[in-house]
Image (cartoon, grey):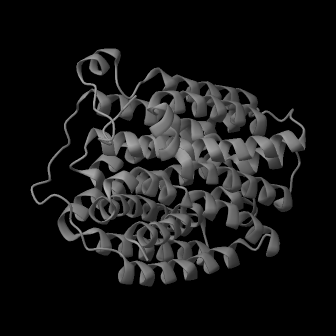
Amino acid sequence: MSPALRIGAIGFGLIAVCYGFARFAFGLFLPQIDSDLGLGPSLSGIISGGSFAGYCIAIVASAVLTERIGARAVAVGAAIAAAAGMAGIALAPSPLILAIAVVVAGSSTGLASPPMAAAVAAAVRKSRQDHTNTVINAGTSAGVALSGPIALAIAGQWRLAFGAFATVAVVLALAAAVSLPASRGEQNAGGLPPMNGPVVRLISASFLMGAASTALWSFGGQLVSQQLGWGPTGTGILWTCIGAGGIAGAWAGTLVGRFGLDPVHWTFLGLMSASIIAVGSGIAAPALALIGGALFGAAYVMLTGVYLVWGTHALPDRPATGLMIGFLTIAVGQTAGAPLFGFMMAGTDAGPAVTCFAVVALFAGAFRARSATESAVAQPSKGTGKRFD
């Protein structure tokens, strides 16, 4: 098996478990968890924000640890954290214990992504790296898509679901220990990354996109439950549509290579905005809400792929750190966005919050991967893998 295929398969599975199960499945099961533990919208938002905050801390630690102790060890640690956090969710007797477990589970996603970028940089040939990275990144969608049918099959038994997810994470830890390279990246890497133009604009765009995405990642289940009257079956189908749509994110590297970062960025920000309205407005027909879910999944995973490529091109000698910057800032935006949406939703009906967050997604498009001045000064030759536009 080629390095690209081996690392791509393990990375896809690890991201599916950490992102699709450990992080985003909480939003799918939130109506049932709320019913059992009496959380309410405000506390739900705070807990969701705590998950994103745990991610923020973990992804910084992961980038540093990957450069010091290697990709394999950090990836195995990510899978173990996912297993521990999801086991804690399954057993949580109170909102406090649940909140702690959600933070631990959410931190696994921060640990998972940087070592995979480093593994790809170390073992996959240059021409295949963008494609391999974005295929791995699309594992999020597979996890989300699988969590929907699982929710349907077990008829709302969220504790059983998270127990099963924890078992899968243990299996992925073993697979990562056997299959991933122990690369530490550049021996002289370290310290803070340079705050050049592409990095600053990446931070701005990814923050706004991350904040906007919490409208559906954290509250999608509650929105369709409250506004469309959907039960666990409807929310499970919505989650399946989100995950299935997100598989399109595997082609982010291909689309960026053909059309450039900025056109792909703008296109999918527009789709994200439209999808938030379609799912959260409460006036759309059920079929349109499900289509909106699929568009949201495609847009979110495509945009994370865009920020992944953007970051690794901005810091080509430090791929784990380049990825960390974009993904960290997405999570910072989500940390801020989830509580804000929860408070807005608790104070009025959901309509103003949904509209506001759809507009925030569009604002992210104001930031370009490379300014016109930078494009005129530096025009990389074809095939270098350093192209921004």
Q: Quadrant of the N terminus?
A: bottom left
In this rendering, position of residue 331 left or right of residue 230: left
- Find the residue positioned furthest to the left: 188
Vertical side of 128 occupied by 100: above or below: below
Query: Percent x, y for residue 197?
Result: 27, 26
Q: Where is residue 227, by image quadrant?
A: top right
Residue 334 visible in the snapshot? no
In this rendering, position of residue 171 left or right of residue 236: left
Query: Percent x, y for residue 303?
Result: 52, 41
Residue at left 27%, top 31%? 380
Residue at left 52%, top 35%? 209
Residue at left 38%, top 29%? 369
Q: Where is residue 26, by image quadrant?
A: bottom right
Residue 131 visible in the snapshot? yes
Labels in figure, total? 0
Query: Percent x, y for residue 263?
Result: 52, 27
Query: Percent x, y for residue 333?
Result: 47, 39
Vertical side of 19 occupied by 85: above or below: below
Residue at left 70%, top 26%? 352
In this rendering, position of residue 29 left or right of residue 230: left
Q: Where is residue 27, by image quadrant?
A: bottom right
Q: Quadrant of the C terminus?
A: top left
In this rendering, position of residue 125 left or right of residue 31: left
